[in-house]
Amino acid sequence: MSLVLREGDVEAFFEAPFNAYPPELGYVSPMKGDIVRMLDPGRNPLWQAGNAYRFWTVHRGDRPVGRIIAHMHGASNARWGWRRAQFGFFDCADDPPAAHLLLSAAEGFAREQGMGELVGNFNLTAMQQCGVLTGGFGQTAYTDMIVGAPWLPGLLEASGFTRFFPMTTFEVDVATARRPPHVLDPARFSFAPIAQQTFPERMAEARQLLNDGFHDNPMFVPLTPEEFLFQAGEMTAILDPRLSSVLTRDGEPVGVIIAIPDLNGFLKATRSRIGLLTPVHFLRFRLRRRRAVVIFYSVARAAHGQGIMGAMLAHTLERMQAAGYESFGVTWIADENPASLRQIERLNGRPLHRLHLFRKELS
């Protein structure tokens, strides 16, 4: 069958991974509506800020079997002194000619932008899903974890990409996790749950704490209010206020944990589409929540090294166990972040997946 590259086909972009990957791979897509929002220049603040992007799908016959987006993040290049274009959502069948077409298109975009390297996956920035799965294939993923096929690293390497920046995702058993020491003075410290009625105020605090606590992390760029709300605004529909909280000391926010129920079972049941049975699947999801995922946790830099993060994790574990959750996942932690790795080790967390970024220098 003939091989055709198409640009700008949103429907095919959503469908491609379902054709590229067998069901046993465990791929779970974001909701179709979320993919549409991400690609819409009128709705995604990344594109409204002037960051260029293009996306493609590759088709065999009438079936999309691969996809990729190439994009710029001007704030990252400005802060870190890069000349970097990024690719994301690289999903492809085990089809080297198809992969070559997609990656060549992304490289062409990077050269058009005058960049010196192409790096990915970023779906769509380092503050969102990041990396290419290189180990732990077959492990059941949690929401916001990248799932990819075992042949993707080879397809990238065949096109001249090399791996760097290793990362790991983790799973923690709630019942057997070691509890960090809970040493907070209740006269000074208080946990404020993130609930629907306090969502705007708490999320504004969460963004400030994320930007402050992550300031020195590799690749991190502070999120604007618009970017943060774009990523988190849909969270109100799935909130469980027992999981997420902002910690205050003497009335001032010093730490935050954002965790949500794992959505992957619901997404699989609906094939990530809104349909007639979606309300039924959502009700089942609400009644059977046993897995959660920690999206991020952060402590203000002025409060680092004071045992606050351990106490926050202990509090969250207690709340999860009381609510009937059995496990939670932790999205990627880089090898060069030993403090976060030590926190997970103290919890008896087990590694789930291995990921790397891939890059190619452009002549």
Image: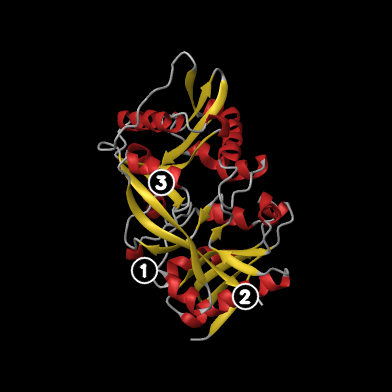
Residue drawn where x is 51% and y is 77% of the image: 99
Query: Which residue is identified by label 2?
Result: 105
Query: Which is in the foreground here, disc 1 or disc 3?
Result: 3
As drawn, which residue projects farthest toward the bottom?
A: 1
Check if mark 2's residue and mark 1's residue have beta carbons within 8 Å.
no
- 243 lies left or right of 51: left
Residue 266 at what x, y percent from top left? Answer: 39, 48
Residue 323 at what x, y percent from top left? Answer: 33, 30
Query: Which residue is identified by label 1?
Result: 22
As drawn, which residue projects farthest toward the top?
A: 187
Check if mark 2's residue and mark 3's residue have beta carbons within 8 Å.
no
Residue 262 visible, this angle: no
- Of the residues shown, which amino acid type is indicated by label 3? Leu
Residue drawn where x is 66% and y is 77% of the image: 363
Residue drawn where x is 32% and y is 64% of the image: 24
Residue drawn where x is 67% and y is 57% of the image: 73
- Of the residues shown, which amino acid type is indicated by label 2? Ala
Query: Which residue is identified by label 3?
Result: 341
**Callout 3: SS:** helix
Q: Rounded to the nearest whole Å, what is the CA distance between mark 1 and mark 3?
A: 32 Å
Residue 112 at what x, y percent from top left? Answer: 72, 72
Residue 201 visible, this angle: yes
- Of the residues shown, which amino acid type is indicated by label 1? Pro
Any mark on residue 7, and which? none
Up the image or down, 52 lies above or below 284; here it is: below
- How many neighbours does mark 1 have within 10 angstroms: few (below 14), some (14-19), or many (20 or more)? few
